[in-house]
Image (cartoon, rainbow, N blue to C red):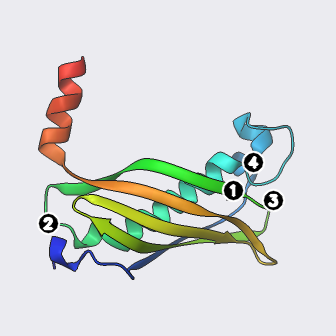
Amino acid sequence: MGIEDIVPGLVGQAELVVAEENTARHLGSGNVSVLATPEMVRLMERASVAAVDHLLPSGQHTVGVHLDVRHLAATPVGMRVVARSELVAVEGRKLTFHVEVHDEVEKVGEGTHGRMIIDLDRFRARVERKR
């Protein structure tokens, strides 16, 4: 397996059962005890990572570079949510995913997520230069 295996159609998934620490009230992104938008986004990113990172050579990973998402419906504490991410485009090191999140009743989020394949050593060196 390697970078040549990073092709459209790859799918990843991530899930969680909404707990109080995942709510808008707890995170300060709202004042209600439902799945917070930042937690939904985190789930979308985890699903995208699950789709491709395991196929990359040692020393390479992906990092998020773009999000365009809509949070469509509220999900209460105790309900399971599942994010599904499908790789839809590969342009060099740039990867584009279609992401959706469903709870046990309906689709609660959707959008596009961009990730970039990076060389971890070069990435770390660039970050260190900022210090």
> Which percent across, then down, holds residue 8?
35, 78
Q: How crowded is the residue under tag 1: few (<14 C-alpha within 10 Å), some, or many (20+)?
A: some
Q: Which residue is mark 3?
A: 77
Residue 48's place in the image compared with 21, above or below, is below
Instruction: Tell me which label, 3 or 2, sits earlier in the chain.
Output: 2
Instruction: Tell me which label, 1 or 4, sits earlier in the chain.
Output: 4
> Which percent across, then down, holds residue 38?
63, 46
Quadrant in which the C terminus appears: top left
Mark 3 or 2: the one toward you: 2
Q: Secondary structure under badge 4?
A: loop
Q: Which residue is rendered at x = 74% and y = 33% of the image? A: 28
> Which percent across, then down, holds residue 90?
30, 68
Q: Which residue is mark 2?
A: 57
Q: Secondary structure under badge 1?
A: strand
Mark 4 or 2: the one toward you: 2
Amino acid found under the numbered disc labelled 1:
Arg
Task: Mark 3 and mark 2 in contact? Answer it, CB < 8 Å.
Answer: no
> Which percent across, then down, holds residue 96?
41, 63
Q: Secondary structure under badge 2?
A: loop
Q: Residue furthest top?
A: 131
Q: Secondary structure under badge 3?
A: loop
Q: Which residue is rendered at x = 21% and y = 79% of the image? A: 5
> Label 1 vs label 2: CA separation?
33 Å
Amino acid found under the numbered disc labelled 2:
Pro
Instruction: Tell me which label, 3 or 4, sits earlier in the chain.
Output: 4
> Label 4 vs label 2: CA separation?
36 Å
Q: Which residue is mark 1?
A: 70
Amino acid found under the numbered disc labelled 3:
Val
Q: Which residue is mark 4?
A: 23
